[in-house]
Amino acid sequence: MPKAIAIGIVCFAGKVLIDRRPVDAALGGLWEFPGGKILPGETPEACVAREVLEEVGLTVTVGELLAILEHDYSDFFVRIRAYLCHSESDAARAIACDAVEWVEPRELDGYTFPVANAPLIPLIQQRLCP
């Protein structure tokens, strides 16, 4: 049974929000897009809004589904739904992560992401931000 994950590609002023996973967590030290496990009875969109608020303190408008990705890590399988999101503010802060950064889509190649997120990078760069 795959882990159901929803993430937000949060955009503000043409930049995308990324956060760094805590070093002591699974995939620690890697950069990611805010998000997490979809709770029982929760929609993927509600999960994105909740996780972004919990992880970086931003309230976002969840938009269209950008992609559904699947990846088989050696010890677990994930199905990730990635949504384009808009923030009215760039006041993200590291709450449940080690760091946050707003980056230009073309700069995403300079960060190390979990393997499961890799297919998102060119999609984001092609679409940029709404």
Image (cartoon, helix red, strand yellow):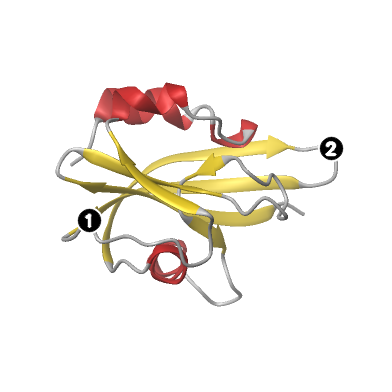
Please provide percent x and percent y for residue 78.
67, 46
Residue 38 against residue 109 in the figure, above or below: below
Q: In the image as oriented, which residue stretches furthest toward the right?
A: 75
Q: In the image as oriented, which residue stretches furthest toward the bottom?
A: 41
Q: CA distance from mark 2 to mark 1?
A: 36 Å
Question: How crowded is the residue under tag 2: few (<14 C-alpha within 10 Å), some, or many (20+)?
Answer: few
Q: In what element is the residue under mark 1?
A: loop
Is 20 on the left or on the right of 24, as rendered? left
Give the quarter of the image for residue 37: bottom right
Q: In what element is the residue under mark 2?
A: loop
Is 74 on the left or on the right of 87, as rendered? right
Three-letter amino acid code at the position of disc 1: Asp
Q: Nearer the viewer, residue 112 or 50?
A: 112
Q: Which residue is mark 1?
A: 90
Q: Which callout, 2 or 1, points to the residue nearer the camera?
A: 1
Along the polypeptide, which appears first: circle 2 or circle 1? 2
Q: Identify the residue at horizontal 36%, vertical 69% (top origin).
A: 57
Q: Which residue is mark 2?
A: 74
Please provide percent x and percent y for residue 73.
77, 38
Q: Identify the residue at horizontal 71%, vertical 55% (top origin).
A: 25
Q: Nearer the viewer, residue 3 or 22?
A: 22
Q: Nearer the viewer, residue 30 or 33?
A: 30
Is 113 on the left or on the right of 57, as rendered? right
Three-letter amino acid code at the position of disc 2: Ser
Please provide percent x and percent y for residue 103.
31, 36
User: Which corner quadrant holds the C terminus?
Assistant: top left
Query: How many numbered circles are shown?
Result: 2
Give the quarter of the image for residue 108: top left
Give the quarter of the image for residue 91: bottom left
Q: Identify the residue at horizontal 51%, vertical 27% (top origin).
A: 119
